[in-house]
Structures are given as structure tokens and as C-alpha cells.
Amino acid sequence: MITEALFVSALIFAIGTLGVIVRRNVIIMFLCIELQLNAVNLAFVAFSRSVGIEGQLFVFFVMTVAAAEAAVGLAIIISIFRHYESVNVDKFNLLKW
Amino acid sequence: MFFALQATTEGAHEWSPVLPGLVILLPLLGFVINGALALTHARRSADAVRAGGELDLAAGDRPLTHTLPTWIGPGVIGLAFLITVVNLVGMAGADLHEPIIRTYWTWIVTGSLTVDAAIQLDQLSMVMMLVVTGVGFLIHVFSVGYMKDDPGYPRYFAYLNLFIFFMLVLVMGAGYLLMFVGWEGVGLCSYLLIGYWFSDREKSDAGKKAFIVNRIGDLGFLVAMFFLFTTFQTLDFVEIFSAAPERIPYGHSVATIITLFFLLGAAGKSAQIPLYIWLPDAMAGPTPVSALIHAATMVTAGVYLVARSSVLFALSPIASATVAGIGVITALFAATIALKQYDIKRVLAYSTISQLGYMFLGVGVGAYTAGVFHLMTHAFFKALLFLGAGAVIHSVHHALHHTDKDWDAQDMRNMGGLRKHMPITWATMWIATLAISGIWPFAGFFSKDEIIWAAGAWAGAANAPYPTLYTVYWVLALVTALLTAFYMTRLMVMTFHGANRTGEKEAKHLRETPAVMWVPLAVLAALSVFGGWINVPAAISESFLGGFGFLPMGENFHHWLEPVMAGAHEIQAQHLGEISHQAPLFGGGELVWALASTGLAAIVVLIAARVVGGQKHVPAVDAAEPRGLGRVLYRKYYVDEAYDAVIVRPVHALSRFSWRFVDDVIIDGTVNMAGNLARAFGWVGSLFQTGQINTYAFIFTIGVLVILGWVAF
């Protein structure tokens, strides 16, 4: 049972990671990060069956932090969008030497 | 000075020196005051120039910075001289056998080395103090007249006072390290005063040359001190000289090594072969400086060093023979160069080198007293000659200045016939010339003759180490004496006799110098006549040369220095045996040879006067360069050129190699390569930093996978 759950979790995490790497739209990338977080949540819940209540506890923490992160992230995206009039990360290349 | 002082005081009594430290401090005080005045004066001149004008000294604009040094400069030295004379009288009455040491504070304590700031008063340092302050005072007074229109007047006196201070430290220090302080200090002052007119490139170069050549000698002094310390664990004179005869066996190599390194130091300071080349160039300084530093005092420091270390030198017959050999060869060599020089100061410079050679011969043949005696008489007559030359140059310079003639005021070819314009200078300089030529009864006769005789006597000593060598020295010394008489007479004849060559209009402006300049000349002339009478061997004073014992002559100086030289004389008496009373060649006693040498010198003076007087002299601008041997002498044996080719150029080439290759290529190359490598790596690294978030995320993921994989397996 746990194997299937972990398999799904890993699959979702991989999809999220791939999305962050290959997509250029910053909103999509943001969604992909959420996918990764929730993949982890799934793994936590799956483990909590055998390990204990701590796994479910952690899921709540992750969800609150993810909510805060979504608020901040979206705010940043909006201000970047105002600056560049775009959501394409190819244009946000100032973070280098 | 020493006349009868010793003889009359029968009952020896305890004696405490009067303010000996003040003798040293007074010149230092003069330096501080004059130095402050010099700085003030420099600022005022700079302000005046900035305001568009300048301080006009000749027009009588004499601020306080010019009147004060006139009194302070010579004043402090005069006071020091007075204190010295008071101490001399006390010492003469005290029958002193041990030096008096005054310790002021402990200067250096490190490991087993303890050095006190202490001065040593004994008969030798007393003689040197008298010469330094006495002759120094006269030269300071002369300088007042000579330098009065110079814009750097206060600076000049500051340097001169500082020199006297260091010279006194040199001769009064109670150990080698303190002596070394003075040794370095006088070198510094010599450099400052040679390059006194520093805006003239040639003159500041001459200062540098003197300084650098002296450094080579100073290295020898330092190494000798290291050896001394490892041998004796101390640098104090008293301890070393009392321990040396027991610690070092006669002729042992330790004594030889120490003394040969000291000789290197002495050769540098006293301008002996091979380090003599700086002294002729040192004539770039003001003439009174040449008189004080480069004739009377500083250059004799090497002789003082050998005389002071007489115990050590007496222990090493090889080193003594080397000292004497270098001395006599230098004496002959410099005398031949002096034969063909035209610059009046250069003739005197080579003459000084030659006379210093005599002093080295004296201390090298164990006649330490004779060496110091010649040092003293030489200080009198050579200072007189230099000051006389200064008076002549002063006068000729002003005469040439009147018509703006750009002739060399120091070239004897531009002089001639000055006798009727400057009778006092003429008379006093003739006295000095006769003195240096060794004509009876002038001072040089007694001192030089004693040295030459000592060389001959040493050659005939019972266990003389190298009798043949010393015989050669003796012959060379005699020949040099005759050359001396020749070149000095030539100088006098070319300068003062014959027709005037300065030019008709100029000759009208030739004047005798003011009293402030000729009075010191007269005093020195008196000393040049009678100064030698304090050390006349019995054989001579009892003959008709001493008025059959009626003239006030005697061996006073010899007895005076005996306590200082006793240690060395004891060693000599032990190992050399009875010295000879016969000349090594042709036989004959001291009186015969004294008569012969003064007679021959007198004949040479007459011949030189006829020969040089009979020659046709032309001003320097019309003169052709001498030919043949004359040119070799005129060019000073091309020694400067040889040194340039053998030492200076290779050093330059080596320095260039070190700069252009070792420094620029190897060292800078390594440093630059380290920097460039870091930059190259950074450049490669920067290629990964694209600014693309996706790339970063990709690399980050890879990294996480790698770490996970590493942890898992």
C-alpha cells in the first residue's frame, strides 16, 4: 500500500521538478513548486501510517508555510511583472555576475 | 702644549676630570640651535621666493639666522676646547696610568653583551680631543669669513657642529661600539658636507661616492667587532686590551683576522689603497670642510683606530706589516699623482692621502706614538694648507666674479703671482709647505722623520719578522718624502710666484682675506713651526739640530702617550727584541739620516722652485693635456676608470639583471601568474552563472541527486 503511495508521491515530485527546470512561465514554475511540496506532503502522510502522527503534523506545517510562501511569491511575481510586463523567466536574468 | 707640563709637576695627585661630558654635549647643543635656525631660515627663504623676491645676503640683509650661527657655531667649539685644555692641565699633573672611565648609563643589554654609554679619558683621547676641538675651532672661525655670503650659512654650521660632536664620540668612546657610532656619524656629516651644495649634481654625487666607499670599510669594522665579541665577550677597550695578551698567543690568526678587518675599516675612513678614491672627489665640499674633515680630523680616524688597538696589532706581525705596506704604497702612489694635478685642492687631497699613508706606515711599524704624532702635526699644517687654499680660492673666485669670467677658481693654472696680493696667506702657506716637506725645524720634519726612522729601525730589529720588506718600506718612505717636497713646492710656485694668469682686469680685485680668515692661518702657522718640538728624540735634540739641547725640545709626547702604548710596547719588547740604531742600508744613525732627509728635501724644494718657476704656464683654457707619463699621472693612473670597469659596471649590470629578470620576470611573473590563474578559473566558473533560474534549478537538482546518491550508496 505504502509503495503505491510513495510511487505516486515520487512521480508528482518528479513532474514538479521537471516543470521548474523546463518551463519558462513563472506562474507555471510556481505551480510546479506547489506540486513538489504536495508530493512531499503525500509522502509524509503515507509514512505516518507506519511511523506515527508526526508525519501528519508536519503536513500541516508544510501547508501553512506553503500558504505564506504562495502569498509572498505571488507578490514578487506581480512586482516583477509590473517591471518587465512579462512572466517569462528568460527575461529575468540579472541574477548573475 | 705639552711643554714642560709633565716635567714640572713632580708630586702626582689624584685627579678628577672637569666636565668631560660637556665637551661632547656642547657641539651637540650647537647643532641643535644652528639646525633650528637653519630650518627657520629655509622657511623664510622659501617664503621670500614665493613672494617673488629673495633674501639678498650680499646687500647686508642679515637676519638673526645669519648672525647667531657666527657666534654659536665657533663658540661652542671654543668652549669645548677650553674645557679640554683645563682637563689637559689636570691630566698632565696627575701622572695617569689607567684611563679614566666615566659611565653615564647602560646603553645596550642583550644576551651576554652589555654596552655602557661611557667615555674614556686617557692620554690618547686627550690628544685627539685637543686636535679636534682646537683645529676645529680655528676652522670654524675661518668658516665665518669663508661662508659669509652663502645662503645656507646656518645649515653649514649645524653640520659642522654635528661633525665635531660625532668626532668627539669617536675619540672619547670607551668601547668599540661607541667608537663605531662616532665612526658612522662622521661619515654621515662628511656626506652632508661634501654634498653641501647639493643642487650641483657633481657635488652631491661626490658625497654619495664618499658615503658608499666608506660603507665598504665600515663593513670591515663591523666584522672585526663581531670577531672581537666572540673572542672577548665584550667590546670595552680596557677589558679587551688587558685580556688580549693572555687570550691570544703572539702571531695567532685571531689577532690577524680581527686587525685585518679593522684595517679594511681604517682604509675606508682614512682613504688608503684600495678605498682612497673618495677623498679627491670629496674636495667638492666647501674648503674649510676639506680642511677639517678631509685633512685634519675625520680621515685620521683610521690611524686613531690602529693606535687605539695597538695591543691587537702588536700581536699580529702579519697585520702590522700589511698596515705598513698599504700605508707606504699609498703614500708613494698618491704623491706621484699629486705631481701632475692642477686643481689646488686636488693636489692637497692627494697630499693628504700620502701623509695618511705615512701615519699608517708609522703605526704599522709599531711606532704608534710616531703615527699619532704625525697625525697631530699633519692636522696643523694640512689644515693650514687647506685654509690657505681656501683663502686663495675665495680671493680668485671674487676676482673672477667681478668680470663674470667663468674660469675655474681652483685651477692653479689660473693663478700665479698671488704673493703680492695675499702676503699673509703666502707666508703662512710657505711655512706649512716647509713643514710638510720635512724641513728642519718645522713640525713635519720631526714627525715624518720619526716614522721613516722607525721603519728603518724595525727592519734592523733583532727578531724582526720581515726585515727585507721593512727595508723596502724604509726606502719607499724616503723617496716619498722627496716627492712631497716637490709637489708642494710646485703648488706654491704655481699659485703664488711668477706672473699672474688670472687676467689683467681680474687681478685688480685680488685681495688679502679679512682678519677672521688670516688669524686662524697665523695660529696654525705657529703650530706648524713649533708643534714638532714636543717630540724630539734625544739624539737629535742634543745635536746642533736641537741647539745642543738648548731649544725647548724633548721627548714629551712620547712619554705622554707611553701609558696608552705600554701594552703594545711590552709585546714588542718580548717578541722583537732590541730594535736597531742603524739604518738598514748604508749604516748611519738617526741623526745622520735626519740630516740627510732634511737636506735632500731642502734641495728638492730648491730644484722644484727652479724647474716649476722656469716652466711657462698658461691659463687652463689654453693648456694642452699632458702627454706620456704626465697624462697617466694627470688622469690619476686611470684608477677611477678601472674601478668603473671592474666594479661599478658589473654591479650595475648585476643590478639591472636582478631588476629586469629576477624581479620583473621571475618574482613579478609568479605573482601575476597566481592572479591570472585565479581569474581564469573565475571566468570558467562564471560561465555557469547564466542568470537563468531554470539552469540554476537544474544544477541544483543534479547536486541534490549527487549528494543523495553518495549518501545512499
Image (tube, rainbow, N blue to C red):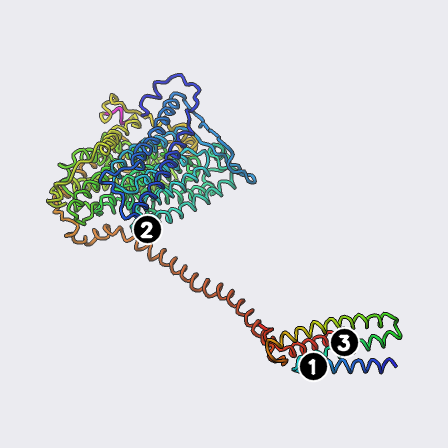
Amino acid at dot 3: Leu
The answer to whether dots 2 and 1 both sit on one chain is: no
Magenta-highlighted stretch: main secondary structure?
A: helix
The answer to whether dots 1 and 3 both sit on one chain is: yes
- Going from N to C along the chain, the mark reached first, 1 or 3, is 1
Instruction: Kindly identify which residue carries mark 3.
Output: A37
Locate residue B697, reporting x and y percent.
Answer: 67, 77
- Residue at 43% x, 41% y is B259
User: In the rendered view, does B543 fall on the left or right side of B687?
Assistant: left
Instruction: Kindly identify which residue carries mark 2.
Output: B205
Amino acid at dot 2: Asp
In this picture, is B711 found above or below B59?
Answer: below
Element type at mark 3: helix
Locate residue B628, reporting x and y percent.
Answer: 20, 54
Location of residue B74 by image quarter: top left
Amino acid at dot 1: Ile
B681 or B222: nearer the viewer: B681
- Residue at 64% x, 80% y is A87
B22 or B213: nearer the viewer: B22
**Chain ID of residue with mark 3:** A
Instruction: Kindly identify which residue carries mark 1.
Output: A28
Element type at mark 2: helix
Point out the image quarter for the C terminus of chain B: bottom right
Q: Which residues are magenta?
A: B539-543
Residues under labels 3 and 2: Cα distance? 83 Å
